[in-house]
Image (spheres, rainbow, N blue to C red):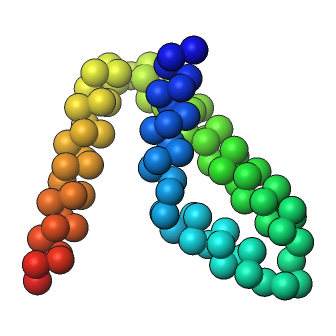
Amino acid sequence: MKGILVVFVSIFLAELGDKTQVATLLFATDRSLSRLGVFVASSAALVCSSLIAVLGGEQLARWVSPNVLKLAAGIGFIVIGIWLLADVRT
């Protein structure tokens, strides 16, 4: 159960304020769309994209060690962070 909670909290925090949430917010401002419909459609889209990520990750793990994947993801996030910080300074 602890692992599932870690996944939930990590994804929840990562999704806060991202472009998907902003897009959902903008759709919710459209008076011609049902708020429930926007919620269901955006939830279904997140579920489908998560399914693709899980299935892709499962296949990738068959060829690449999970430790290598974690290291690559960590390095990737650091590189993106440095890139974003460098872009702010220019």
Viewer-proximal residue, 77 or 88?
A: 88
Q: Position of residue 83 (x, y in %)?
A: 18, 65
Occupied quadrant, residue 24? bottom right
Residue 33, horizontal then vertical, whole percent? 86, 77
Residue at 50%, 42% (x, y): give it. Answer: 11
Q: Is residue 29 above or below residue 68?
A: below
- Quarter of the view holding residue 60: top left
Quick check: can you spot residue 59? Answer: no
Which residue is located at x 59 percent, y 32 percent? 55
In front: 74, or 63? 74
Q: Quadrant of the C terminus?
A: bottom left
Total marks placed? 0
**Camera-side residue: 31 or 55?**
31
Query: Residue 86: x and y, percent?
Result: 12, 71
User: Can residue 35 be seen in this snapshot?
Assistant: yes
Tell me what residue is drawn at x 24 percent, y 39 percent: 74
Task: Name the side, left or right, on which 63 lies relative to 2.
Answer: left
Task: Determine whether 82 is above or below 2 in the image.
Answer: below
Question: What residue is drawn where x is 86% and y is 64%?
Answer: 37
Q: x, y percentage for residue 38?
A: 80, 66
Q: Is residue 83 above or below residue 5?
A: below
Image quadrant in which the N terminus is located: top right
